[in-house]
Amino acid sequence: MVVNKCFDYLRKYKQQARSIDMDIADGRYPEKILLLREKNEQLEQLLQQLDETEYFVLLLKFVNGLRYDEISEVLQISMNEVRNKLHRSKRKLRSIGTTKGGYFYEM
C-alpha cells in the first residue's frame, strides 16, 4: 500500500514538474529549457539505480519534506534505518553521479 501511494505521488509530481519547467522557461531561453531537461533526465537515470527503499526515502525526505519519524511511519521501518538509508542513498547517488559523467559529474 505504501509503495502504491508513493507511485501515485510520483505520477502527480511528474505532471507538476513539467508544468513548472514550462512556466520557468516561458520560451525565451531555449538553451535553459534544454539544460533543464537534460538535468532532469540524468537525475531520473541516477535515481533509477537506487533500490526501492532508498529511492522512497529520498523522495519522501526531499520532495515531500517529511521528517525522519514520518518517513519511518510511512515506510514502516525504524528511524535508524531511515537515517542509514538516507545517508547511503545520498552517498550512492554522489558516487554514481561522479563516475558516470554528465551534469552531476562535479557533484
Image: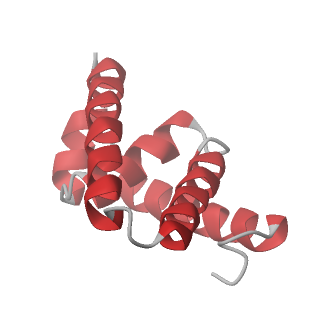
Instruction: Name the residue nearer the viewer: 40 or 7.
Output: 40
Residue occupying the far bottom of the picture: 106
Query: Viewed as shown, does residue 63 lie left or right of 38?
Result: left
Which colouring convention does the figure follow? secondary structure
Q: Is residue 75 above or below residue 91?
A: above
Please name the residue shown 48% across and 63% down the image.
33
Please name the residue shown 33% across and 54% down the image.
22
Q: Quadrant of residue 99?
A: bottom right
Please name the residue shown 59% across and 51% down the image.
41
Query: Viewed as shown, does residue 60 lie left or right of 97?
Result: left
Horizontal and vertical percent for residue 90?
A: 54, 66
Please name the residue shown 64% across and 56% down the image.
42
Instruction: Name the residue nearer the viewer: 79 or 90.
Output: 90
Instruction: Name the residue nearer the viewer: 102 or 29.
Output: 29
Horizontal and vertical percent for residue 95?
A: 72, 69
Total number of numbered discs in the rendering: 0
| Quarter of the figure that contains the N terminus | top left
Horizontal and vertical percent for residue 27?
A: 38, 62
Q: Quadrant of residue 2?
A: top left
Horizontal and vertical percent for residue 55?
A: 48, 44
| Quarter of the figure that contains the C terminus | bottom right
Query: Viewed as shown, does residue 10 lie left or right of 94?
Result: left
